[in-house]
Image (tube, grey):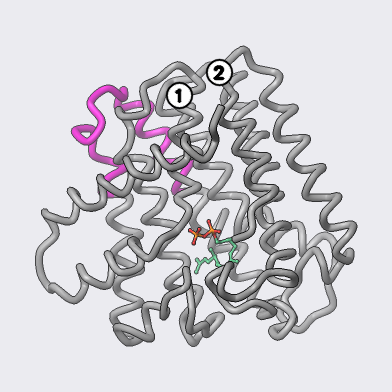
Amino acid sequence: MDINRYLADRKNAVEAFFEQYFRKVGRPVVLREAMLYSLNAGGKRIRPVLCLASYEACGGNSDEIVPYAAALEFIHTYSLIHDDLPAMDDDDLRRGKPTSHKVYGEAMAILAGDALLTEAFVMLTDPLLGPAVRPDNLLRAAGEIARASGCRGMVAGQAQDMLSENSEPDEETLRFIHRHKTAALLRASVTAGALLYGGAPGVIDAMDRYGQNLGLAFQVVDDILDVEGDTEVIGKPAGSDEKKKKMTYPRMYGLDRSRDMARAFVADAVAALDAVPLAVDPLRELAFHLLGRRH
Ligand code: GRG
Protein backbone atom coordinates (compact mmCIF):
# COMPACT_ATOMS: atom_id res chain seq x y z
CA MET A 1 0.00 0.00 0.00
CA ASP A 2 1.03 3.62 -0.57
CA ILE A 3 1.18 5.03 2.96
CA ASN A 4 1.88 8.58 1.78
CA ARG A 5 -1.27 8.47 -0.31
CA TYR A 6 -3.22 7.03 2.59
CA LEU A 7 -1.99 9.77 4.92
CA ALA A 8 -2.70 12.54 2.40
CA ASP A 9 -6.28 11.35 1.77
CA ARG A 10 -7.16 11.17 5.48
CA LYS A 11 -5.38 14.47 6.20
CA ASN A 12 -7.43 16.15 3.45
CA ALA A 13 -10.68 14.84 4.92
CA VAL A 14 -9.79 16.27 8.35
CA GLU A 15 -8.70 19.63 6.95
CA ALA A 16 -11.86 19.93 4.84
CA PHE A 17 -13.82 19.41 8.05
CA PHE A 18 -11.96 22.29 9.83
CA GLU A 19 -12.90 24.61 7.00
CA GLN A 20 -16.56 23.66 7.19
CA TYR A 21 -16.69 23.69 11.01
CA PHE A 22 -15.35 27.20 11.40
CA ARG A 23 -18.06 28.68 9.20
CA LYS A 24 -20.30 28.38 12.27
CA VAL A 25 -17.84 30.03 14.69
CA GLY A 26 -18.48 33.78 14.99
CA ARG A 27 -17.03 36.64 16.99
CA PRO A 28 -14.63 37.74 18.19
CA VAL A 29 -13.06 37.38 14.78
CA VAL A 30 -9.54 37.48 16.21
CA LEU A 31 -10.22 34.45 18.44
CA ARG A 32 -11.54 32.49 15.47
CA GLU A 33 -8.50 33.59 13.45
CA ALA A 34 -6.06 32.58 16.17
CA MET A 35 -7.68 29.11 16.44
CA LEU A 36 -7.54 28.64 12.67
CA TYR A 37 -4.01 30.06 12.40
CA SER A 38 -2.57 27.30 14.56
CA LEU A 39 -4.85 24.57 13.22
CA ASN A 40 -3.91 25.43 9.65
CA ALA A 41 -0.21 25.92 10.30
CA GLY A 42 0.49 22.56 8.66
CA GLY A 43 0.76 19.70 11.16
CA LYS A 44 1.05 16.06 10.13
CA ARG A 45 -2.46 15.29 11.53
CA ILE A 46 -1.12 12.03 12.86
CA ARG A 47 -3.56 11.75 15.78
CA PRO A 48 -6.74 12.04 13.65
CA VAL A 49 -5.24 9.75 11.01
CA LEU A 50 -4.50 7.11 13.66
CA CYS A 51 -8.08 7.36 14.91
CA LEU A 52 -9.49 6.98 11.39
CA ALA A 53 -7.14 4.06 10.66
CA SER A 54 -8.12 2.25 13.83
CA TYR A 55 -11.86 2.68 13.07
CA GLU A 56 -11.24 1.35 9.56
CA ALA A 57 -9.21 -1.60 10.88
CA CYS A 58 -12.29 -2.62 12.88
CA GLY A 59 -14.38 -2.56 9.70
CA GLY A 60 -15.82 0.98 9.73
CA ASN A 61 -15.94 3.63 7.03
CA SER A 62 -13.78 6.46 8.34
CA ASP A 63 -15.94 9.16 6.68
CA GLU A 64 -18.39 8.47 9.53
CA ILE A 65 -16.08 9.74 12.27
CA VAL A 66 -14.06 12.58 10.71
CA PRO A 67 -15.43 15.20 13.19
CA TYR A 68 -14.43 13.07 16.18
CA ALA A 69 -10.98 12.41 14.74
CA ALA A 70 -10.61 16.15 14.02
CA ALA A 71 -11.30 16.87 17.70
CA LEU A 72 -7.99 15.14 18.50
CA GLU A 73 -6.19 17.69 16.35
CA PHE A 74 -7.94 20.49 18.25
CA ILE A 75 -6.59 19.09 21.54
CA HIS A 76 -3.11 18.56 20.12
CA THR A 77 -3.03 22.08 18.66
CA TYR A 78 -4.10 23.62 21.97
CA SER A 79 -1.24 21.77 23.67
CA LEU A 80 1.28 23.12 21.18
CA ILE A 81 0.03 26.72 21.57
CA HIS A 82 0.29 26.51 25.37
CA ASP A 83 3.61 24.65 25.27
CA ASP A 84 5.14 27.48 23.22
CA LEU A 85 4.06 30.25 25.65
CA PRO A 86 6.71 32.29 27.46
CA ALA A 87 5.67 30.66 30.76
CA MET A 88 6.40 27.22 29.32
CA ASP A 89 8.91 26.56 26.53
CA ASP A 90 8.96 30.15 25.24
CA ASP A 91 9.38 29.23 21.56
CA ASP A 92 9.05 31.59 18.61
CA LEU A 93 8.65 29.00 15.89
CA ARG A 94 6.20 26.13 15.48
CA ARG A 95 5.33 24.18 12.36
CA GLY A 96 7.73 26.55 10.56
CA LYS A 97 5.66 29.62 11.45
CA PRO A 98 5.74 32.23 14.24
CA THR A 99 4.04 30.83 17.34
CA SER A 100 0.53 31.96 18.31
CA HIS A 101 1.62 34.38 21.06
CA LYS A 102 4.10 36.01 18.65
CA VAL A 103 1.25 36.76 16.24
CA TYR A 104 -1.75 37.34 18.53
CA GLY A 105 -0.17 38.17 21.90
CA GLU A 106 -0.10 35.99 24.99
CA ALA A 107 -3.67 36.56 26.15
CA MET A 108 -5.22 35.62 22.80
CA ALA A 109 -2.88 32.62 22.44
CA ILE A 110 -3.98 31.31 25.84
CA LEU A 111 -7.63 31.84 24.89
CA ALA A 112 -7.23 30.22 21.46
CA GLY A 113 -5.76 27.16 23.22
CA ASP A 114 -8.55 27.13 25.80
CA ALA A 115 -11.16 27.44 23.07
CA LEU A 116 -9.66 24.61 20.99
CA LEU A 117 -9.59 22.28 23.99
CA THR A 118 -13.16 23.09 24.98
CA GLU A 119 -14.48 22.90 21.44
CA ALA A 120 -12.94 19.44 21.04
CA PHE A 121 -15.31 18.20 23.74
CA VAL A 122 -18.24 20.05 22.17
CA MET A 123 -17.54 17.92 19.11
CA LEU A 124 -16.90 14.71 21.04
CA THR A 125 -20.23 15.00 22.87
CA ASP A 126 -22.33 15.81 19.81
CA PRO A 127 -23.93 12.62 18.47
CA LEU A 128 -25.27 14.52 15.45
CA LEU A 129 -21.73 14.97 14.08
CA GLY A 130 -21.43 11.21 13.63
CA PRO A 131 -24.86 9.60 13.48
CA ALA A 132 -23.38 6.21 12.51
CA VAL A 133 -21.69 5.99 15.92
CA ARG A 134 -23.67 4.62 18.86
CA PRO A 135 -23.92 7.30 21.59
CA ASP A 136 -22.56 4.91 24.24
CA ASN A 137 -19.51 4.26 22.06
CA LEU A 138 -19.06 8.00 21.59
CA LEU A 139 -19.23 8.51 25.36
CA ARG A 140 -16.55 5.86 25.96
CA ALA A 141 -14.27 7.37 23.30
CA ALA A 142 -14.77 10.90 24.68
CA GLY A 143 -13.92 9.66 28.19
CA GLU A 144 -10.78 7.93 26.95
CA ILE A 145 -9.62 11.09 25.18
CA ALA A 146 -10.42 13.29 28.20
CA ARG A 147 -8.42 11.03 30.53
CA ALA A 148 -5.47 11.02 28.13
CA SER A 149 -5.49 14.81 27.87
CA GLY A 150 -5.67 16.00 31.46
CA CYS A 151 -4.04 15.38 34.83
CA ARG A 152 -3.90 11.60 34.21
CA GLY A 153 -2.25 12.10 30.82
CA MET A 154 -0.76 14.88 28.73
CA VAL A 155 -1.03 17.68 31.30
CA ALA A 156 0.64 15.46 33.95
CA GLY A 157 3.45 14.71 31.49
CA GLN A 158 3.89 18.37 30.66
CA ALA A 159 3.96 19.29 34.36
CA GLN A 160 6.60 16.65 35.09
CA ASP A 161 8.58 17.78 32.04
CA MET A 162 8.66 21.35 33.35
CA LEU A 163 9.56 20.19 36.87
CA SER A 164 12.41 18.05 35.53
CA GLU A 165 14.18 20.72 33.50
CA ASN A 166 17.80 21.08 34.60
CA SER A 167 17.75 17.89 36.66
CA GLU A 168 19.81 14.79 35.98
CA PRO A 169 17.81 12.30 33.89
CA ASP A 170 16.48 9.21 35.63
CA GLU A 171 14.79 6.35 33.82
CA GLU A 172 11.60 6.31 35.84
CA THR A 173 10.89 10.04 35.40
CA LEU A 174 11.87 10.00 31.73
CA ARG A 175 9.49 7.13 31.10
CA PHE A 176 6.70 8.91 33.00
CA ILE A 177 7.16 12.08 30.92
CA HIS A 178 7.13 10.25 27.59
CA ARG A 179 4.18 8.03 28.48
CA HIS A 180 2.08 10.98 29.60
CA LYS A 181 3.17 14.01 27.59
CA THR A 182 3.23 12.30 24.21
CA ALA A 183 2.14 8.67 24.26
CA ALA A 184 -1.12 9.22 26.16
CA LEU A 185 -2.87 11.23 23.42
CA LEU A 186 -1.42 9.10 20.61
CA ARG A 187 -2.57 5.95 22.40
CA ALA A 188 -6.02 7.40 23.02
CA SER A 189 -6.27 8.42 19.34
CA VAL A 190 -5.87 4.79 18.31
CA THR A 191 -8.03 3.36 21.09
CA ALA A 192 -10.79 5.91 20.44
CA GLY A 193 -11.11 4.70 16.84
CA ALA A 194 -11.82 1.17 18.06
CA LEU A 195 -14.12 2.43 20.84
CA LEU A 196 -16.13 4.53 18.37
CA TYR A 197 -16.65 1.42 16.28
CA GLY A 198 -17.56 -0.67 19.30
CA GLY A 199 -14.64 -3.10 18.93
CA ALA A 200 -14.39 -6.28 21.02
CA PRO A 201 -12.36 -6.05 24.26
CA GLY A 202 -9.43 -7.99 22.70
CA VAL A 203 -9.31 -5.50 19.84
CA ILE A 204 -9.40 -2.51 22.19
CA ASP A 205 -6.53 -4.01 24.22
CA ALA A 206 -4.46 -4.63 21.09
CA MET A 207 -5.07 -1.08 19.85
CA ASP A 208 -4.11 0.24 23.25
CA ARG A 209 -0.81 -1.65 23.23
CA TYR A 210 -0.11 -0.58 19.66
CA GLY A 211 -0.91 3.07 20.46
CA GLN A 212 1.17 3.14 23.62
CA ASN A 213 4.27 1.72 21.91
CA LEU A 214 3.80 3.89 18.85
CA GLY A 215 3.48 6.92 21.12
CA LEU A 216 6.70 6.09 22.94
CA ALA A 217 8.54 5.53 19.64
CA PHE A 218 7.16 8.84 18.39
CA GLN A 219 8.63 10.78 21.31
CA VAL A 220 12.01 9.02 21.14
CA VAL A 221 12.19 9.96 17.43
CA ASP A 222 11.18 13.51 18.36
CA ASP A 223 14.03 13.64 20.90
CA ILE A 224 16.47 12.35 18.26
CA LEU A 225 15.26 14.90 15.70
CA ASP A 226 15.83 17.68 18.21
CA VAL A 227 19.51 16.64 18.27
CA GLU A 228 20.00 15.73 14.60
CA GLY A 229 17.32 17.64 12.69
CA ASP A 230 17.45 21.02 10.94
CA THR A 231 15.25 23.83 12.22
CA GLU A 232 13.84 24.37 8.69
CA VAL A 233 12.81 20.73 8.36
CA ILE A 234 11.46 20.10 11.86
CA GLY A 235 9.66 23.46 11.89
CA LYS A 236 10.80 24.36 15.43
CA PRO A 237 14.18 25.34 16.86
CA ALA A 238 16.55 22.35 16.77
CA GLY A 239 18.71 21.82 19.85
CA SER A 240 16.20 23.36 22.23
CA ASP A 241 15.98 20.24 24.45
CA GLU A 242 19.72 20.46 25.12
CA LYS A 243 19.50 24.18 25.77
CA LYS A 244 16.69 23.71 28.29
CA LYS A 245 18.31 20.59 29.77
CA LYS A 246 15.17 18.55 29.07
CA MET A 247 14.97 14.94 30.09
CA THR A 248 15.25 13.09 26.78
CA TYR A 249 16.25 9.64 25.51
CA PRO A 250 19.45 10.85 23.80
CA ARG A 251 20.51 12.60 27.01
CA MET A 252 19.81 9.48 29.06
CA TYR A 253 21.00 6.75 26.66
CA GLY A 254 22.89 8.41 23.80
CA LEU A 255 21.77 8.51 20.15
CA ASP A 256 22.56 4.93 19.11
CA ARG A 257 20.70 3.32 22.00
CA SER A 258 17.82 5.74 21.54
CA ARG A 259 17.49 4.66 17.90
CA ASP A 260 17.47 1.00 18.97
CA MET A 261 14.81 1.74 21.56
CA ALA A 262 12.60 3.54 19.02
CA ARG A 263 12.89 0.50 16.74
CA ALA A 264 12.01 -1.81 19.64
CA PHE A 265 8.90 0.23 20.50
CA VAL A 266 7.76 0.06 16.88
CA ALA A 267 8.37 -3.71 16.82
CA ASP A 268 6.18 -4.06 19.95
CA ALA A 269 3.50 -1.87 18.37
CA VAL A 270 3.41 -4.01 15.25
CA ALA A 271 3.43 -7.23 17.30
CA ALA A 272 0.30 -6.02 19.12
CA LEU A 273 -1.49 -5.70 15.78
CA ASP A 274 -0.56 -9.24 14.79
CA ALA A 275 -2.75 -10.47 17.63
CA VAL A 276 -5.97 -9.24 15.98
CA PRO A 277 -7.65 -10.53 12.83
CA LEU A 278 -8.22 -7.07 11.35
CA ALA A 279 -7.23 -5.01 8.33
CA VAL A 280 -4.18 -3.52 10.02
CA ASP A 281 -1.93 -2.75 7.02
CA PRO A 282 -2.28 1.05 7.31
CA LEU A 283 -1.60 0.98 11.07
CA ARG A 284 1.45 -1.23 10.54
CA GLU A 285 2.76 0.99 7.73
CA LEU A 286 2.11 4.13 9.79
CA ALA A 287 4.31 2.78 12.58
CA PHE A 288 7.25 2.27 10.20
CA HIS A 289 6.57 5.60 8.54
CA LEU A 290 6.72 7.45 11.88
CA LEU A 291 9.99 5.70 12.77
CA GLY A 292 11.58 7.09 9.61
CA ARG A 293 10.09 10.59 9.81
CA ARG A 294 12.32 13.65 9.33
CA HIS A 295 9.94 16.15 10.97
C1 GRG B 1 0.64 22.42 27.33
C2 GRG B 1 -0.83 20.64 28.32
C3 GRG B 1 0.28 21.01 27.48
C4 GRG B 1 0.92 20.00 26.86
C5 GRG B 1 1.98 20.16 25.93
C6 GRG B 1 2.41 18.48 23.06
C7 GRG B 1 3.14 19.01 24.23
C8 GRG B 1 2.56 18.85 25.55
C9 GRG B 1 4.28 19.70 24.08
C10 GRG B 1 4.89 20.04 22.79
C11 GRG B 1 6.35 19.75 22.80
C12 GRG B 1 6.60 18.33 22.47
C13 GRG B 1 7.84 18.00 21.75
C14 GRG B 1 5.75 17.44 22.84
C15 GRG B 1 5.83 16.05 22.55
C16 GRG B 1 4.71 15.73 21.67
C17 GRG B 1 5.08 16.03 20.29
C18 GRG B 1 6.13 15.21 19.66
C19 GRG B 1 4.45 17.01 19.69
C20 GRG B 1 4.61 17.33 18.27
O1 GRG B 1 3.68 16.53 17.61
P1 GRG B 1 3.68 16.36 16.04
O2 GRG B 1 5.06 15.95 15.59
O3 GRG B 1 3.41 17.85 15.56
O4 GRG B 1 2.56 15.45 15.68
P2 GRG B 1 2.66 18.38 14.25
O5 GRG B 1 3.14 19.80 14.10
O6 GRG B 1 3.02 17.52 13.08
O7 GRG B 1 1.21 18.32 14.55
Report the magenta residues as a range: 122-146
**Residue situated in front as seen by the camera: 273 or 198:** 273
The local crowd at label 1, few if under 14, some if 14 to 19, many if 20 or more residues have their Cα within 10 Å, is many
Q: To which quarter of the image does residue 204 belong?
A: top right
Q: Secondary structure at mark 1?
A: helix
Q: Is residue 186 above or below residue 132?
A: below
Residue position marked by numbered label 2 in the rendering: 279
Q: Is residue 143 above or below residue 236?
A: above
Residue visible at 74% across and 80% down?
Answer: 242
Q: Secondary structure at mark 2?
A: loop
Q: Is residue 131 magenta?
A: yes
Residue position marked by numbered label 1 in the rendering: 56
**Residue situated in front as seen by the camera: 42 or 135:** 42
- Please name the amino acid that badge 2 sits on: Ala
Q: Disc 1 vs disc 2: Cβ atoms closer than 8 Å?
A: yes
Q: Is residue 104 left or right of residue 279?
A: left
Q: Is residue 164 left or right of residue 45?
A: right
Residue 18 at x, y percent in the picture: 26, 51
The local crowd at label 2, few if under 14, some if 14 to 19, many if 20 or more residues have their Cα within 10 Å, is some
